[in-house]
Each structure stands twice: as structure tokens, then as C-alpha cells.
Amino acid sequence: MESLALASAVLEQLAPAATKTRRTRPGRAVGDVVPVPSIHLRVAVTWVSIFPLVTLGMTVMTLSGPITGTWPTWLRALSLTGVVVPTAVYFVVPRVLALSLRWLSWRRRSAAAEPGREVRVGGAR
């Protein structure tokens, strides 16, 4: 349980630092507050999204050794990043970022709803 509390504290530190309003967007009223994620949260989400994709891509390239084993390193890197980067940018990162922002807003609402409960950061008691 302490590791979950520590992870929550770290994510709360990486929480959106600012908010902005958008004029119109389907499904939102005018002036709805939209959280802007901090640069630290975006870095963490990007790394968490890209690491499994690179690991999977390297595994596939290793298993297809007879085909890709003779390729020069630059060609293997080009093919791997040609698949990983668009997949991460268009599919994985937006979903993970939306999920993390939803989870952080839920944590804040639940912490605010419980009177007398303090959200502690860094294990301070």
C-alpha cells in the first residue's frame, strides 16, 4: 500500500500546473476548464508509452533474425522508429495522458470530498 501512496504522491507532483479555457468544443460548454498537463507529466507519460513499444519492436526484430540480422544498424533503427514513433504519438500517448489526467482529477476530487484528510506528499507525517 505504501508503494501506491508513493506513486500517487509522485503523480500529484506531476499534476497539471495550470488550466486553460477553450471557447467551443463538441461536448463541452463554453468556458469549461481544461487541465494543461505539466511538462514533467508529459515526459513521464511519453516514456511509459514508448518503452513497451520499443521493447516489443526489438523483440520482433530479434525473432526475425534471419531477415533483419543482416541489415545495417541504421536501417534497423530507422524501421523501428518508423513504427514506434507514429504509434506512440497518434495512439498510445494521447490515451495514456487522458487516463492519467482523469485519474489525477478523480484523486483530487476524492481528497477534497473527505474532510479532515490531508494529501501528504513525500511520506511526511
Image (spheres, rainbow, N blue to C red):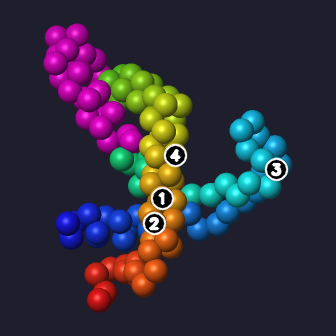
Disc on the earlier residue, 3 or 4: 3
Disc on the earlier residue, 1 or 3: 3
> Which residue does the image show at 33% across and 80% down from the upper left?
122
Q: Which is in the foreground here, disc 2 or disc 3?
A: 2
Asked whether residue 41 is in view, the answer is no
Disc on the earlier residue, 2 or 4: 4
Residue linked to disc 1? 106
C-alpha distance separating marks 2 and 3? 26 Å
Q: Nearer the viewer, residue 32 or 51?
A: 32
Q: Residue furthest bottom?
A: 125
| Residue range (magenta) | 49-73
Amino acid type at circle 2 is Ser
Kindly identify which numbered label has been placed on residue 9: none
> What element does badge 2 sit on?
helix
Residue linked to disc 2? 110
C-alpha distance separating marks 1 and 4? 12 Å
> Which residue does the image show at 33% across and 33% down from the upper left?
53
Q: Quadrant of the C terminus?
A: bottom left
Residue linked to disc 3? 30
C-alpha distance separating marks 2 and 4? 18 Å
Asked whether residue 96 is in view, the answer is yes
Relative to 29, is 56 above or below?
Answer: above
Kindly identify which numbered label has been placed on residue 98: 4
